[in-house]
Amino acid sequence: MELYWQSATSPKASSPIQVGTKGLSSPFSPDQTNFSLAVKTPGNPPALRTVAQIEAQQIEAQDADDYILPLVPRKNGLQPILITDNSPDFGPGSVLFLNSTESDLVVRIGDQTIEIPSKIHTFAKRPADEEASWQQVQISEVRKDGTSKLISNSRWPNNPSLRTILFFSRNPQNQRIHFQIVDLY
């Protein structure tokens, strides 16, 4: 997938930003703090369609040089979530859960239980366990009737310097919740 950034004052688009299969792009540096992200639409000539808007006050309110910018699907496009690279919420050993489904989720990391509301992003710290080389992780969907359905039961490496992002979405073909994990070292 290719994304393009456009400044708020100029219709000219950047060179394409390649977004890989894990949802990561190469780093990019917009020349302004007001910019949008766009995708190409088919046609002759192809046009750009804005999918996310980033405004100056979002960036200027932060005290950082580098940002992580997850884009969460919403009905009217993508919602950018601006995270400073030095954010205390997303330091070493942290996990960011981005739930774009209509269901609440529950994640258990070791003995810690984390509730992740529908359509909300949630930060959490991994429980500290210096002796274990891995942590058991269970992810469950909370159904409308209050029961839970296990989605995943796996082991994660116990690396206290690792930062992790989990993207949850619903597959439109089979209606199952699926997720992608991105580890940042």
Image (tube, rainbow, N blue to C red):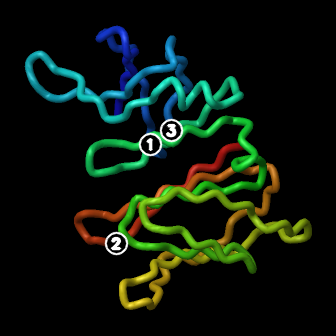
In the foreground, 162 or 65 = 65
Q: Quadrant of residue 181?
A: bottom right
Q: Going by the picture, which residue comes out furthest to the right?
A: 131
Other residues around mark 1 within 10 Å, as few (<14) / some (14–19) / many (≥20) = some
Q: CA distance from mark 2 to mark 3?
A: 23 Å
Viewer-nearest of discs 1 and 2: 1
Kind of residue sitting beneath label 2: Arg
Residue depicted at 91% across the width and 70% down the height: 131
Rendered location of residue 73, percent (x, y): 36, 49
Rendered view: 125 above or below 72: below
Quick one: 70 or 184, which is closer to the camera?
Answer: 70
**Which residue bears the numbered disc 2?**
176
The residue positioned 90% from the left and 66% from the top of the image is 130
| Element class at badge 3 | loop
Circles 1 and 3: CB atoms closer than 8 Å: no
The residue carrying mark 1 is 71
CA–CA distance in space, label 1 to label 2: 21 Å
Residue 178 image position (x, y, % from top left): 41, 65
- Amino acid bearing label 3: Leu
Residue under label 3, please give it.
24
- Estimate how packed mark 2 is, as few (under 14), some (14 to 19) or many (20 or more) residues with alpha carbons within 10 Å: few
Determine which quarter of the picture holds residue 6. Answer: top left
Query: Where residue 59 sits in the image (x, y, percent)?
Result: 57, 28
> Where is the N terminus found, in terms of image quarters?
top left
User: What amino acid does circle 1 point to?
Assistant: Leu
